[in-house]
Image (cartoon, rainbow, N blue to C red):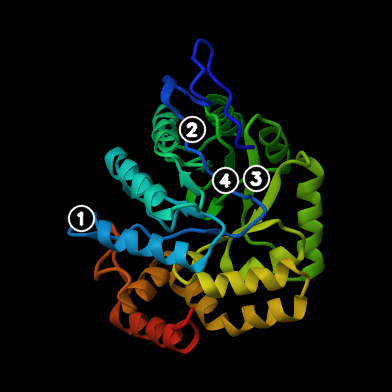
Amino acid sequence: MGTAVPAAGCATGAGPMLRSSGGCISRPLTPGRPVDVHRPQRLPLTPLRDDALDERAFIGLIDRLRVAGVDSITALGSTGSYMYLDRAERRRVTQLAVEHAGPVPVMVGIGALRTSVALRYADDAQAAGARALLLAPVTYQALTDAEVYALFETIASAVSVPVVVYDNPGTTHVTFSDDLYASIGGLTNITSIKIPPLPSHGEEAADRVRTIRGVIPGSVTIGISGDASAATGLLAGCDAWYSVIGGTFPAAALSLARAALSGDADDARAQSTRLQPLWDAFARYGSYRVITAAAEHLGLVGPDSLPHPVSGLPAPARAHVAQVVDRLLTHA
């Protein structure tokens, strides 16, 4: 999965080279282990201060994840505000994430409204040492299935690291059919699909996972998103969890994931039930604002750290989130 394929005409004597839309990137692929798409993925915030990247706070979040012993880090996901950042900001976030993650592999979100821009983000991420790319079909005008497929075909054929399909209909307003999963899953370099939350009933969730698995190649993994659905998804057969809380509270996410992936259904469900007040806050206010309020409450990021016009929670909601964090997650 981590082996790069050189572009035509690229010299290979110095080791594996990156292949990109702009041709060869002369620097060899950064050594290190690949992103394990069978393991939980942590999505940290990208905090701002005075409308600029708060590098110190971001480094602190990455250091926190590395010290916790996470398997991988996903920078510039939805929790990481990727669509609010320009190219220079994204490039800097990626550089800092890779630098401070140490041996922990980093996946980077590259979603953009235009294919050509996503290709440039892919170039930047690979050049900085990203071990995988997370791609969502971001929209303003509605996209057809053919247009979504063309986006993934273009990106996947132009890069030399794994690509994860980011199915996030609530944000992108793109709904993936099973046929679209099948066609995109067959593309070169597509290694995982991040799916939306599953039905809460265990057997219905398992049926849905089996259906998806039946149409995609065996080499493509399935990752659950929506933290309230994590235990259900992992117990239903998902391979990984793309975790919002894992980017800020890695211990809590790791504990739940270990229980579910080891087959300890009772423990996994009990841990998820214990976190229900947090899931309720996510449902009421949105996970993006809630996890930001939690990080601000703990001093992990500064106040007013979201990109305007997005603003933080109102005072009563912030107080509620603080109570939940103090009760459930202070040591997580």
Reply above or below: 210 against 192. below
State the mark number for residue 192: 3
Q: Amino acid at mark 3?
A: Ser
CA gap between label 2 and label 1 equals 33 Å
| Residue 87 seen in the current view | yes
- The image quadrant of residue 160 is top right
Sequence-first tag of 4 and 3: 4
Look at the numbered disc 3 and give the secondary structure of its residue: strand
- The image quadrant of residue 33 is top right
Sequence-first tag of 3 and 1: 1
Q: Residue at x 58, y 47 (%)?
A: 35
Look at the numbered disc 1 and give the secondary structure of its residue: loop
Q: Residue at x 27, y 39 (%)?
A: 88
Using residue 117 as the reference point, say whether residue 175 is left or right of it: right
CA gap between label 2 and label 3 equals 21 Å
Q: Amino acid at mark 2?
A: Leu
Q: Amino acid at mark 4?
A: Arg
Q: Position of residue 55 (x, y in %)?
A: 26, 56
State the mark number for residue 33: 4
Asked if the residues shown at circle 2 and circle 3 are in contact, with their CB atoms under 8 angstroms apart, the answer is: no
Look at the numbered disc 4 and give the secondary structure of its residue: loop
Q: Nearer the viewer, residue 140 or 36?
A: 36
Residue depth check, mark 2 versus mark 1: number of the one nearer the observer: 2
Look at the numbered disc 2 and give the secondary structure of its residue: loop
State the mark number for residue 51: 1
Residue picked out by circle 2: 29
